[in-house]
Image (tube, grey):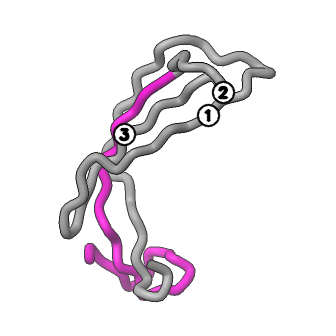
């Protein structure tokens, strides 16, 4: 993706907080691409207590593919791929 100067940009995110996480908790994040189209997609994520199946939060992120004229991925001169 770097060679093609493409990046994913989150356009909407919904987060459901299921339980508190406190200082000292070790967290793990499980991410899955649930839909991928030509120029957009959806990623589902779960935040878990590490080593357990206790869900701290879950989220759905809608994204689009962005083509950048800037090799660093900035916004100058780019557009939707």
Element type at mark 1: strand
Q: Are marks 2 and 3 in contact (CB under 8 Å)?
A: no
Rendered residue at 47%/19% (across/down): 17
Residue placed most toward the observer, 33 or 78? 33
Q: CA distance from mark 2 to mark 1?
A: 5 Å
Say which mark, if any, is on residue 50.
2
Q: CA distance from mark 1 to mark 3?
A: 14 Å
Q: Are marks 2 and 1 in contact (CB under 8 Å)?
A: yes
Element type at mark 2: loop
68 within the magenta span? yes
**Which quadrant of the figure contains the N terminus?**
bottom left
Q: CA distance from mark 2 to mark 3?
A: 18 Å
Rendered residue at 53%/29% (across/down): 47
Q: Within 10 angstroms of label 1, few (less than 14), some, or many (20 or more) residues?
A: some
**Which quadrant of the figure contains the C terminus?**
bottom left
Nearest-to-viewer mark from 2 and 3: 2
Q: Residue furthest top?
A: 19
Say which mark, if any, is on residue 44.
3
Asked where in the image residue 32 lies, by quadrant, the reply is top left
Identify the residue position indicated by label 1 in the image. Answer: 28
Q: Residue furthest left?
A: 37
Asked where in the image residue 66 lies, by quadrant, the reply is bottom left
Counting residues from the start of the chain, the first of labels 2 and 1 encountered is 1
């Amino acid at each position: 993706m770097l060679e093609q100067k493409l990046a994913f940009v989150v356009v909407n995110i919904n987060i459901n907080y299921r339980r508190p996480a406190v200082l000292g908790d070790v967290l793990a994040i499980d991410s899955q691409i649930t839909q991928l189209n030509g120029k957009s997609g959806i990623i589902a994520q779960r935040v878990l207590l590490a080593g357990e199946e206790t869900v701290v939060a879950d989220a759905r992120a809608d994204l689009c593919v962005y083509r950048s004229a800037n090799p660093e991925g900035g916004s100058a001169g780019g557009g939707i791929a």
